[in-house]
Amino acid sequence: MAKKAKRFPIIDMHGSPYEMARQYGAQCRDLIHGLAGIFDGVFVPNASQRDGAHRAIAEAEPIVRKIAPELMEEVEGIAEGAGISFDDAFRLSCSAEMGQWVGCQENRSAVSITDNCTSLAARATNGTLVAWNMDWYQALLPYIVLLRGKPDNGPAFLSFALAGSVGRPGMSEQIAISANQLPYRPTEAPPKGGPDWAGPGIPYCFLSRMLLQQNSTRDALELFARARRMVCLNYTIGDITGDICCVETTPGAHAELPADECFVTHANTYYSPKFSGMPEVEREELDPRAYKANTMLQDNRDQLNPATFFATQSSHFPGQDTGVCHHGGEPGRESISLLSFVAEVGRGRMWAAYGSPCEHEYLPYELYNPHLD
């Protein structure tokens, strides 16, 4: 059966942080209002927990304002352009934080759904590739947009976003990032019981955009050292020079996993000894998505190009309808690979599949809009 060719909505924006975001909010007004209307129900299903979740998120505002004031200007611009409150606009950039906060309240450290993103990077045949399968609730797919920004001061970027958020992984002129959630823990040590909430820090969406402002993977690592975070994630990073790595993070600690091969893969498990990570011998059984991706790239190490990545990201486990390309979840909260991208760092081009990549073509998206340049 032929794959579907469907594009994500592209939100072109340029100018100052506030003006870019005001354009974004105005272009996405209906989508933003639609997502805002279901947001709490998706990420905090228990209504009795919502006031507590809102308070936890609000505690991050002064930290972001101090470290990334330009992104707070973007939140203000989104709110103005879309006609929503500042508080609602800020929360739209904190969905991962809402989910992991709920996990702490319910004494569980696992990520919010069974499978939650796969990330890859390679020093490839013709440059650096960074790739991402974003796995999450299927109900979110209609609200995903691709931000194409050209700031007055800063690198041009492509960043996927849930409508109204400041962004998620993507690429800029010098660097690309992907990410995947990790089980929540407030420190390096695995929690003995339910994890305690570690408190405020920089939310994932804001940190993703801050990473896209960096000039190199080494600059990105310095950012992790100075910016306390709010949730636990692995970030997979590659720059134009071919410097690739994974960076596992908790709120107050991080560990770099350099590339032993010419590629790296990661899913939802700690690997670093700093975090008592999973030994490699256990990964085939206990971390099968990352293991399958690793095996496919290893088998094709002489042809590490976008097509090889497309095949890896679209793959299923033998005899199953899920795999690196994910389909699953409990009834009413089904999850799929909402998007899949491969960024060609330094070439100004990203390939992305709308929804499950086993069913949709990878289509090209350009970093620059010639009508704005």
Image: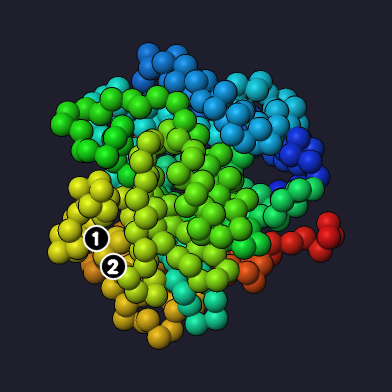
User: Circle 2 — which element?
Assistant: helix
**In the image, residue 50 above or below residue 340:** above
Which of the 4 quarters of the picture holds residue 101?
A: top left
Mark 1 and mark 2 residues within 8 Å of each other at the beta carbon: yes
Tell me, what colour scheme is on the image?
A: rainbow
Q: Nearer the viewer, residue 149 or 288?
A: 149
Measure the C-alpha gap from mark 1 to mark 2. Answer: 6 Å
Q: Nearer the viewer, residue 323 or 280?
A: 280
The residue sitting at 51% across, 75% down in the picture is: 306
Label 1 amino acid? Pro
Which of the numbered marks, if any, corresponds to residue 288?
1
**In the image, residue 182 above or below residue 260:** above
Q: Is residue 15 left or right of residue 156?
A: right
The C terminus: image quadrant: bottom right
The residue sitting at 43% across, 52% down in the picture is: 235
Q: Is any atom of residue 356 visible in this view?
A: no
Label 2 amino acid? Lys
The residue sitting at 66% across, 21% down in the picture is: 85
* Whole-percent x, y for residue 81 in the image: 75, 31
Q: Nearer the viewer, residue 340 or 239?
A: 239
Q: Is residue 329 left or right of residue 345?
A: left
Q: Which residue carries the number 2 mark?
A: 292
Q: Is residue 66 left or right of residue 100?
A: right
Q: Is any atom of residue 53 visible in this view?
A: yes
* Whole-percent x, y for residue 43 in the image: 42, 30
